[in-house]
Amino acid sequence: MAEVIKIRNKRAYAQLFEMSTSLKLDDEVSFSGELLEVDLGPGILSKNFDGLQNDLEAMEGTFIETGQKNVSIDKTAVYTFTPLQEVGASLQAGEWLGEVPENWIDHKIMVPFKLKGHYELVKIVEAGDYKVSDEIAQLKGADGQIVSVSMIQKWPVKWALKSYREKFRPSKIFQTGLRVMDTLNPMAEGGTGYIPGAFGTGKTVLQQAIAKNNQADMVILVACGERANEVVEIFHTFPQLVDLKTGRKLKEKTTIICNTSNMPVAAREASVYVGMTLAEYYRNMGLKVLLLADSTSRWAQALREMSNRMEELPGTDAFPVELPAVIANFYGRAGAVALHNDSRGSITFLGTVSPAGGNFKEPVTESTAKVARCFYALSQKRADAKRYPAIDPINSYSRYLDYEEFQAETEEMLGEDWIDKVKKMKDLLQRGIEARDQISILGDDSVPLDYHLDFWRSELLDFAIIQQDSFDDVDMNSPLERQQSMLNLALKLCAQENELDDFNAVSTHYKKLINTFKQLNYSAFKQEDYKKYTQELEEFSQN
Amino acid sequence: MEIKAFQAVYTEIKALTKATCTLKAKGITYDELAWVDGRNAQVIKIDGELVTLQVFSGTEGIGTAAKVVFAGKPPSLALSQALGGRYFNAFGEAIDGLSQPQGREVSIKGRTVNPVRRQLPSEMLSTGIAGIDLNNTLVTGQKIPFFADPDQPFNRILAEVALRADSDRIILGAMGISHDDYIMFRNSFKERGASDKIVSFVNTSEDPPLERLLIPDQATATAEYFAYEKKEKVLVLLSDMTLYADALAIVSNKMDQIPSKDAMPGSLYSDLARIYEKAVQFPEGGSITIIAVTTLNDGDITHAIPDNTGYITEGQLYLKRDTETGLTIIDPFRSLSRLKQNVIGTKTRADHPQLMNALVRLYADASEARSKQENGFDLNDFDERSLAFASDYVRELLDVDLNLETEAMLDIGWDLLARHFKAFELGIKQEFMDKYWPGEKD
């Protein structure tokens, strides 16, 4: 399979999605007449696709053979259809004709997105079992043309799917269960964020933690040019893990697009677009979709290899000059929308970036910084010190904290001084860094005791709130209510006045606090141990 | 080379560069092998009827009337059990004086394993080295490089790790290593009675550099045969991948490609990933584990080769000389095994993850204390204790020449903690403290 990437005079230049070994002159080439399109319909959820939407499970054999072409969606599968419209209705692209159950979702069958203007519904089948490829409705256009509709439709991946009424500013917190995100720099439903980090700083562990603990209706994971074993881990764990939102298996709400680093480079670019298009499709059903892409740098590298082969003049670091525009367009496709029937749907998009040499001053990181609203900087220093997740609490940011509508909704949920508390915490962390610098310049003895207090308060916040063990069953996920209780407790401990004589006493005191807080973190919320350790900490503060 | 009766011989070369020659030929496939006056060459470009060949050993002395013969197939390898115990060059030709083994011929490029058919790697590969087994546990089916400066004894340690690890087959892909190190590998395999389970593909520094581009494919194709068809536990050693990448850069340069960072081809990531991703655990039992060496320039890991490698492999092991004790250790800070989570605390004792993290964290405190000391500040009691701990930690655990059981490493770890620290300084989960802490309770 190949895609035409350049036409000059009467020559078409095609890029192969597979290896070119053993191809020769005069081999036969045929054109499909279609853009790179995906199939949209029931049967996408909980599937594992390759970068071109081939169902990997449906392929035979241990190895992927060259030229092997498979089905994306099983068109003979039978679903129970329930109509949502009546004959005579005037409809436009994206409106719901009916629904079928897919896992636990009511999968909406929609008016084909490619149709323009209003159509009259002239026929719709009764409730009952139908094959995916069966006709379930007929629409009549203004010109009198009849359009037959089945449960499946096609859409070109490079075009944004805009069959909704309007897009609005994100205002609701998107829960990830990670304290360093939700408490400090929250993501918003329909928001965008990126996670740059050198190798070994925990990008993938972080993304997987988010994939496991989020409150989305559906998760699409794009493994783009990354390690196969990481995807294998998801294949093995997700069918067993329980989703916190639905109580069902995580696998049931997760679709994986997998183009690992040893799979064809050219299909890497396709894989992120396939992921986004599937996300847009489910958003149009009024669902909260989380799209994760690991890593967008591999996609950019694929663009570079392609532009290099076409002998285009390169931009910085040999990347194509249109890279910033391509990235901006892609992030722009995420967002929260209101549909024609007033339902709301969203795509929250988080991409990882793998900057060369861990240096954020490189084209992919810089282009992403301009468009993504949240920034989660993974710090090599924190990773080296095994302080995970290695998100730098000071350099990272969430622009949503500045949105008035976001502030209002968050304070309604977590208390009206919540934003101030978060600021207070950041303030304490900042002061801790300054104190630490002073102590390391002047020495333990030569600074006022306050410096030691500042430093140890920030250490307490670091160990208690920011650090989180993704491999511990309890600590890996903190619901908002727990985060609220923990932040309140930690700030209370920081605010207390102590009668400590010297810096050794300060460090011993805080080390004991930290140790107890860590035990608290390993205890299930509101259970006996949690209460016990909370009380121990409260007593500390009274001493 | 052997010329068969009905093979076409071309004698009109249109263009010659230092490493390539171009001629008119028909029915040629991409990547196919050829011989130019008996020298090994490979098709790297076909434009209409013009075919460009890369001559591995260079084109010095080749004239426009040179004889060109095409093999009609890409580089391939004859697979059979007879490969065991043998030494070959980059083209798979025997270099140990024995006859060429016969077998089923396959292209060495290999195929991609369907990710849904992979098994989650979760069988520990123990080496007796605490820097690996305790801090960065390896599993079968993993791919991991040693990052080492050129002056470190990485090939000796690589051989040691290979011989200690439990495997059915060891495949050595040597690229540009010194002849002395080649002898060292051969001798240590022989001395330790492992000769029969070795298959080696060798390109030393005296061989043409471009030939080493074929070595990883030869090694992994052989590995795939033993792991997939014979269900063996295969360990692939690749040394030195930096020299392999250098050869890639030479080719891309000769083909007028625009270089990206550090004069490396823009496709470096994909080129390296194709090799490393051959590491796999098959559901039927066989596995390919790749342990490679990437030499660094003065410890610089931001260079394109180690940088891209780090993004591909499942962790990295830094070899380092501990300045205080002079011992070679695997740096606990920057080293990482991404797959250790699949075994530690489950296949090993439950206290493993928390104990290991506490040891490394306290070792980090010691290095801070040391820099404080170097800057002329007074050390407090905790600093003094952490420094004493660090020295014991290196001598009793991290030294790569030690050979310990994993359980013993954990016991020594607890003992070190109790020797130097108080319970509240550890931050270890209470249930493990109750069970394993040999020191006082508070």
Image: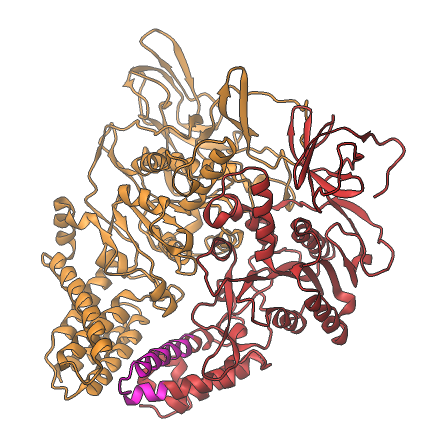
Chain colours: A orange, B red
What is the quadrant of residue A420 in the picture? Answer: bottom left
Pick out the residue farthest to the bottom: B440
Quarter holding the N terminus of chain B is: top right
Name, please, the residue furthest toward the right: B5
Image quarter hosting the C terminus of chain B: bottom left
Residue toward you, A285 or A262? A262
Relative placement, left or right, of B214 versus A537 is right
Can residue B187 be seen in the rendering of this structure?
A: yes
- Whether residue A254 can be seen here: no
Query: Does residue A488 lie above or below B30 as drawn?
Result: below
For this rendering, which residue is in front, B1 or A207? B1
The quarter of the picture where residue A415 lies is bottom left
Q: Is residue A14 magenta?
A: no
Image check: A442 left or right of A383? left
Tell which of A530 and A381 is nearer to you: A381
Q: Nearer the viewer, residue B30 or B257?
A: B257
Answer above or below: position of A255 versus B21: below
Percent of width and height locating residue B275: 60, 51
Q: Is residue A320 left or right of residue A181?
A: right
Q: How many marks?
A: 0
Q: Is residue A387 above or below residue B104?
A: below
Q: Measuring from the top left, give residue B329's x and y in whole percent.
A: 51, 76
At 21% across and 42% down in the image, what residue appears? A170
Q: Is residue A147 above or below residue A161?
A: above
The magenta stretch is: B357-386
Judge whether residue B377 is colored magenta: yes
Q: Residue at x 75, y 72 (%)?
A: B187
Please name the predominant secondary structure of the magenta segment in the image.
helix
**In the image, residue A237 lies at what x, y percent?**
47, 56
Residue A193: x %, y % from top left: 30, 47
